[in-house]
Amino acid sequence: MNHITTLFFRLAFSLLIILTPIVSTAQVEMADNFRGEGKIYVVIAIILVILTGFFYLLFRLDRKTKRLEEEVSQNQK
């Protein structure tokens, strides 16, 4: 794994640990309303699209960084 993806996963895990107690004590009236009206699926779909795009951008950035690192190491030889 590249440094960027490792850093991202560490940050995400840290946020998960920090925010879990806060989210678990919050009221879920809005979620109940969304679930009752069927809008929860729209919310989940939007979140999945955003996360998919974010991971795609990270993957592309990782590939470009790896390619540039290889070019620099070849030019230094």
Image (tube, helix red, strand yellow):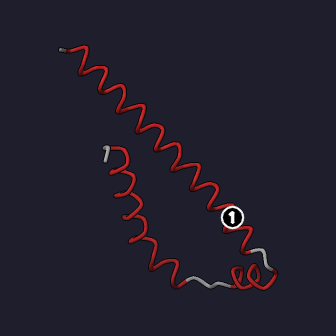
**Compared to 76, does 42 lie above or below?**
below
Task: State which quadrant residue 63 falls in.
Answer: top left
**Compared to 63, does 9 lie above or below?**
below
Task: State which quadrant residue 28 falls in.
Answer: bottom right
The residue positioned farthest toward the left in the image shown: 77
Q: Nearer the viewer, residue 6 or 22?
A: 6
Q: Nearer the viewer, residue 46 or 66?
A: 66
Quadrant of the rendering where the C terminus is positioned? top left
Q: Position of residue 21 (x, y in %)?
A: 44, 80
> Which residue appears at 30% of the width and 27% of the height?
69
> Which residue appears at 33% of the width and 51% of the height?
6
Is residue 68 toward the left or the right of residue 32 in the image? left
Q: Position of residue 71 (x, y in %)?
A: 31, 20
Is residue 77 toward the left or the right of residue 14 in the image? left
> Which residue appears at 37% of the width and 48% of the height?
5
Q: Nearer the viewer, residue 5 or 26?
A: 5
Q: Callout 1: 10 Å neighbours few (<14), some, many (20+)? A: few
Q: Nearer the viewer, residue 26 or 67?
A: 67
Label 1 residue SS = helix
> Which residue appears at 32% of the width and 44% of the height?
2
How many marks can you see? 1
Q: What's under tag 1, amino acid-wise?
A: Ala
Q: Which residue is mark 1?
A: 45
**Compared to 53, does 73 lie above or below?**
above
Q: Position of residue 42 (x, y in %)?
A: 74, 68
Task: State which quadrant residue 62 falls in.
Answer: top left
Q: Position of residue 27 (x, y in %)?
A: 62, 85
Is residue 1 toward the left or the right of residue 21 in the image? left
